[in-house]
Image (spheres, grey):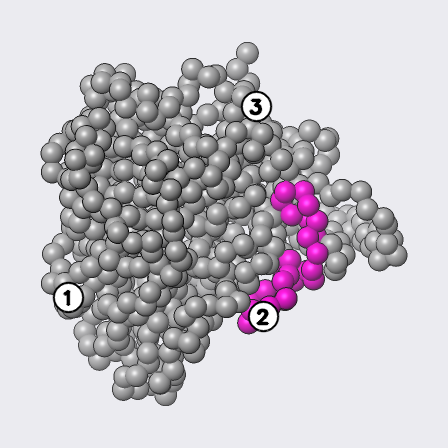
Amino acid sequence: MTDDDSGQSLLGGKTGNKTESYASKIIKIWATLAVLVTLLLLSLLLMLAIYQKENTIGEIIDQIIPLLEVPVDQDVAESGDGHLQTGPISIDCDRTCTMGDTRTCVFQWKVGYYYSMLTGLNRPCGNCPFNQSDCLRSGCVTLNGISRPVATVNREVPGPKIIVCQGDTIVVNVTNRLEDMTGITFHWHGVRQIRTPAMDGPSMITQCPIPFATTFTYSFQATESGTFFWHSHIGSNRVDGLAGPLIVRSIEDPHQNLYDVDDSSHILFLQDWMNITQSTNFLKYLFDIGENKPDFLLINGQGKGPPFYQGFDEPFFTPRYVLYVERFRRYRLRLINNGFTACPLQVTIDSHELLLIAADGRPIQATSCDGIFMTSGERFDVVIHANQTIGNYWVRLLGLEYECSTCKEFAILRYKGAPETFPLLPESPTAMPKLVANVPDNPPVEFPNTFKFTDLRSLDRFDANVNSMNTHYLPLGFYQPSTNDSALRLDLPQINHITFTFPPVPLLSQHNEVDQSSYCDDRVVSTWTHCLTSQCTCTQTLSAQLNETVEIFLYNQVDDISCHPMHFHGYSVRIVGMGKIKSEHMPPSEVRERDQDGEFPRLETNYAPMKDTFCVSFQSYVILQFVADNPGWWFVHCHLDFHSLMGMAMVIVVGTDDDIKDLIPEHFPRCHNFQP
């Protein structure tokens, strides 16, 4: 895959003609001198490497690349849609947001493989965990203390935080240095990508993979505030380390009077973890010789794993994350679940109530609870009041599904003035919280008191045009149709009884190059009765006219796992109905009839809560609505990576080619099918 212009980097856009300024001339002169000096340094380094035999050519190039960086004109930066953005350039946009202060925030990422727990003399982790401060060194990835390969951005797990203000332009220069020459893409989970659909990131939906040794620039505006995160969107290597927080702070937060502190140290990035890489785990799962079960849980990339011994002394462990607070202050915590297995998580903090103020980046009416039920891809913002006795308290993360019920991890909430010790309460048993939020209709465990997501209310009004609304009825779950490959596992994750087929080229920019017979429409597919017994595969799409109101009725009648967390790219949807559905294997036509008879009610409010990722639990349904005002080809899929890769996905096409063509940057990278 190359750009149409020979010698160009894989950039998200192309700079237009502009008058050359005096500053630009100075930059060109500087760049010429930098190249000459760099060539000299490269020659010296190569000779030194040959002499010492310590560096590979790739490592030498990585040392040279920073020397080639040219200063950017402080008044001009380029966006992914090919238009110029004005404003100062900044590499650190984590600040208090004020009206009129918008910036272009530039991030340099190098994607490469790395290893956790690199201990020893002159190694990143030094004498960790025997010297706990060594575990916190820059470049030391501890995880749960078990050494294993990881995929990283800038050798960090989780990856670098992106923290900006609403209205800023985010520019991320991604250089692929994955040593096995794997392609890579990145998705900005929850960011709607308004007018920048080419920056969304899912491989072969909106872009080609970024090849080894090339650079691609993602550039988009942070149009909406909220708690988001970024992760790779090719294969399943996001769960090997390629993920991190993305926070867009609001200039005028409707809940700003409810908290005193909102900073980067109070982000909790949660995920399950395995002691083997996901390429191995996925193949074991695909060929039915293994299950997708986590070994550990992590909080901000840290956890307590197996013990380490030094002689006959007491055991040492890798450190847990510490959350610092000051008594009587109120803190906004941003919870992000980067999970990948069918293991929903419960989050609680000993002796502290949680005040929910946002879900998936969208503000809601403040609601109190004691715990939160979270599935993969979900985010919740909560406020805690540090009004307890000065001391240490457990932040508890507990796996809830039967396959991960023994998994748990802890962080420490430490008050200023408290001793640097563990909390007084034991790690287990974990007390059941009194009131748990966001619990689905058929949870994997019983809770004393709960409320569903539909019990919450948005702060933003939504007026659906119900008179012209089109409703699509889509069953989903695990099914067992016959296949032509007896080596694969029997259970197939599907939507509408279809296994989604990824195309050979990106749909957003090259869908006309795809064999039209490989596409299928969701409403046509719903009439195919043979798909219940024989596997049906196609690139399934759901089409919507620009600005029409769309309603989707998702239902899961299979008793397979606790839930499928469904993620919508390009949209934050209104959840207007949730409930149980008892009968098995009802075709969409029967569900439609029962719906028309009033069996599945909608919320009678204009303030239904909004989400981009939500759980569809077994034998239950979720009804969602949105206005199709964001043209593009938008991926919809289960956020359990293995389910998505095996076909539990589809694409929502909003608008026509004429609506979309001007949103694709000029000279956007293309790739091709090499079939003769």
Give the numbered dot on residue 672: 3
- Judged from the image, the secondary structure of the residue bearing numbered disc 1 is loop
Q: Please name which of the two marks, 1 or 2, marks the residue nearer to the observer.
A: 2
Q: Which residue is mark 1?
A: 432
Q: Magenta stretch: give its range.
A: 77-105
Quarter of the figure that contains the N terminus: top right
Q: Earlier in the sequence, mark 2 or mark 3?
A: 2
Secondary structure mostly seen in the magenta stretch: loop
- Residue plotted at (59% across, 46% down): 218
Asked whether residue 16 is drawn in magenta, I would say no
Can residue 374 be seen here? The reply is yes
Q: Which x, y percent locates residue 519?
A: 41, 21
Q: Which residue is mark 2?
A: 98
Distance between mark 3 and mark 1 Cα atoms: 54 Å
Distance between mark 1 and mark 2 Cα atoms: 42 Å
Whether pointer 3 and pointer 1 mark residues with C-beta atoms closer than 8 Å, the reply is no
- Judged from the image, the secondary structure of the residue bearing numbered disc 2 is loop
Whether pointer 1 and pointer 2 mark residues with C-beta atoms closer than 8 Å, the reply is no
- Label 3: few (<14), some (14–19) or many (≥20) C-alpha neighbours in 10 Å: some
